[in-house]
Image (spheres, helix red, strand yellow):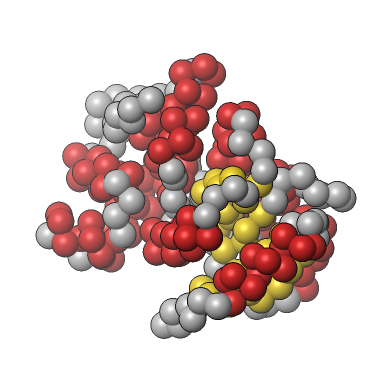
Amino acid sequence: MNDTIKIILVDDELLFRKGISFLLEREKNLEVIFEASNGDELISFLQLNSNHPDIIIMDLKMPVINGVEATKIIRKEFPEIKIIALTSYDSKSFVANMIDVGAVSYLIKNATPQDLLTTINEVALKGFYYTDSVIKVIKEDVLTNKKLKSNFDNNFLTKREIEVLKLICSQKSSVEIGEQLFISPRTVEGHRNSLLLKTQSKNIAGLVVYAVQNDIIIMEI
């Protein structure tokens, strides 16, 4: 297994993009395989090349195709690619919108370099990474919009699936979950796939949103 995390940077600010690229290329486990100045360049690259990234770091406000629209397209055409929003917009509506369309993490551009590196590594390892402030927005968005999904009945999720879901929300990896529950990582993956199917979630980030929506986990706000 190749431990190198392949990354694409998408931002229309050239100087900022080059600065991020320089920062990431200094890390032994990170490789920037492409840079794009807008969503159209990004989508074209993905469609024409088989060398796909593990993670895309995406700005929101860009010409031609913006970050939100590009994220929607990628979630449909290339669902295995994880998207981290990195933007100067910190309003709750932007955060909620990007999470809703499939971003697995959300960072503001005044974050520290270490914040960015931590986010990338956590997303690569566990599939998502939410800061306390993002979790707060998710919870508030749920309270405002009441977008609750029905559990149908008390047996909608099994006891084991709920245990796995809670540990996923604690940002534990499949190996860590397996060790805690005394099951194999492959069994954990099976439960995770079942959870995605039952909750109609697009990704692990969606499972966290589902758990918050249905009070399976309680987040302080």
Total count of labels:
0
**Which residue occupies 62% across, 31% down?**
91
Which image quarter is the N terminus in? bottom left
Q: Is residue 162 above or below residue 5?
A: above
**One can see residue 46 in this view:** no
Q: Is residue 114 above or below residue 63?
A: below
Image coordinates for residue 11, horizontal then vertical, percent: 74, 57
Which image quarter is the C terminus in? top left
In the rendered image, the residue lying farthest to the right is 64
Image coordinates for residue 83, horizontal then vertical, percent: 58, 55
Q: Is residue 30 above or below residue 62?
A: below
Q: Quadrant of residue 57?
A: bottom right
Q: Nearer the viewer, residue 187 or 122?
A: 122
Image coordinates for residue 156, horizontal then vertical, percent: 30, 33
Q: Is residue 122 found left or right of 157 in the rendered image?
A: right
**Which residue occupies 62% across, 61% down?**
56
Image coordinates for residue 105, horizontal then vertical, percent: 52, 49
